[in-house]
Amino acid sequence: MTTLSEYDSVRLVWTDLNGVARGITVPGEEAANALDEGVGFANGVAELTLEPGLLDDPHYGAEGGDMMAVPDADSTVPIEWADDTAAVFTSLSNVDGSPFDLCARGALENVLDELESEGYRALAGVETEFSLLSPDGDGGWVPYNDRCSYDLDAIDMSSELISAWRSAMETAGYNVLGVHQESQPGQYEVNIEYDDALTTADGITFFRHMAKSITRDHGHKASMMPRPHSGEDANGLHFHLSLWDLDESENQFASETGNMQFPAGKHPAGDSGISDEGRYFIGGLLEHMKALTAICAPTVNSYKRLIPGIWAPVNIAWGPDNRSTVLRIPPELGPATRIEHRVPDSSCNPYLGMAASLAAGLDGIRREIDPGEPTMKNAYEEEYERLPRTLWSALDHLEDDDVLAEMLGASLIESFVKLKRDEFNRSMDHVSAWERDEYLDEF
């Protein structure tokens, strides 16, 4: 097994509450020495706004002291685009070794511990969508191409970049299942094979860092902004979630009975369906969906994605192979049975999004929440409760959700809400071109 000291440089990686990757580069020997106690940072950095800046009334101010980034040696991955360099993911603690209450990775670890106490191991795969942009010559950025869904010319045009992305991910130990052009110009999707939920969340963080770095080296930009262009579809980060027994030998969502119907068939065919635990997990997600939206769609721009007509979820419903719902059951059943959570977007902090989703599902299992019947129809045209229309509204629901506060930590939820309300308030101080076009000459 490779040790940290074998690398010339090691990047200690953690995320702030927004999900922005932060950290420090240290010599390999120093990283190895940090395994027990970690490396110190001012704890207020965990609450940085996206400007970036500090809140007026942060949880941790200048007087707050340090937090320690403690490397998880098992998460070490080589960085292919930097010579003799590795990344290691870290969880944050206080100086005395107690857990740091604003650590997103720590929140996910806590939820996974809760699941394991109930006999479950959480596995997750992801669909990562992002926008590939090129310089327009005037200091701006435009879509990399003018192609659309699954266009093979788009694959040829970007083959050098795709090869570099895939090689870097696979060198780091993540299996890339496929890369394709998504529905809009310059929009790409990379699918990463499922793994345990913590490894998958680390992998999303690594992917973002990798894609931005390699794409920048090629003279372009990879952006995880949810909806960078008007009139076009937006970037999701769909979670594919399943619960297994502790030795990962049996999918607890799988059922040989139930005969769930799918619009274009299922595999395996026959009387297969989804287990009671899977149904209760769905019930928990639906029960907490409005609060989950604040964490899974965490920016002002996120709500430009959650609208009808662009294949993004709007109504709180679930269905078999149904992309008009917030939760889709893919048609691969048996050991592949899983729940696709379609609300998370490309700006979601993967640790918090995964932690909140799993916490909601576990609450559904514990309380045996009935999700109701799935829909085979277009959920956009049916009468279901709607997702919050704005970040502010979603934050109201998150503040009222005692289960998520208990599972993720009340202080973390309080700081997240404060951070995001500040973001919303700053957005209200800016007037858009659309508003001027709509109102300037009419009133």
Image (tube, rainbow, N blue to C red):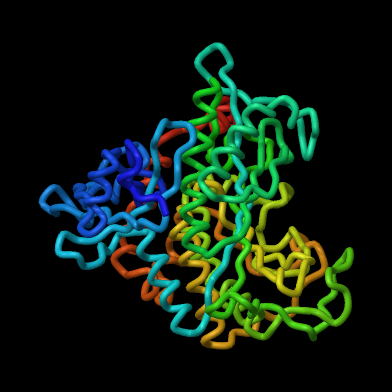
- Residue 313 picture quarter: bottom right
Residue 118 position in % (x across, y down): 48, 85
In the picture shown, does residue 68 fall above or below 227? below
Residue 415 position in % (x across, y down): 31, 58
Image check: 172 left or right of 48? right
Residue 416 position in % (x across, y down): 36, 57
In the picture shown, does residue 125 fall above or below 186? below
- Quadrant into which the C terminus falls: top right
- Closer to the camera in the image, 44 or 385: 44
- Would residue 443 be seen by someone viewing this image from the given angle? no
Residue 68 position in % (x across, y down): 22, 55
Image check: 111 left or right of 316? left
- Closer to the camera in the image, 270 or 308: 270
- Closer to the camera in the image, 424 or 442: 424
Question: Which residue is rendered at x = 50% and y = 47% of the image?
Answer: 347
- Residue 106 picture quarter: bottom left
In the picture shown, does residue 315 fall above or below 17? below
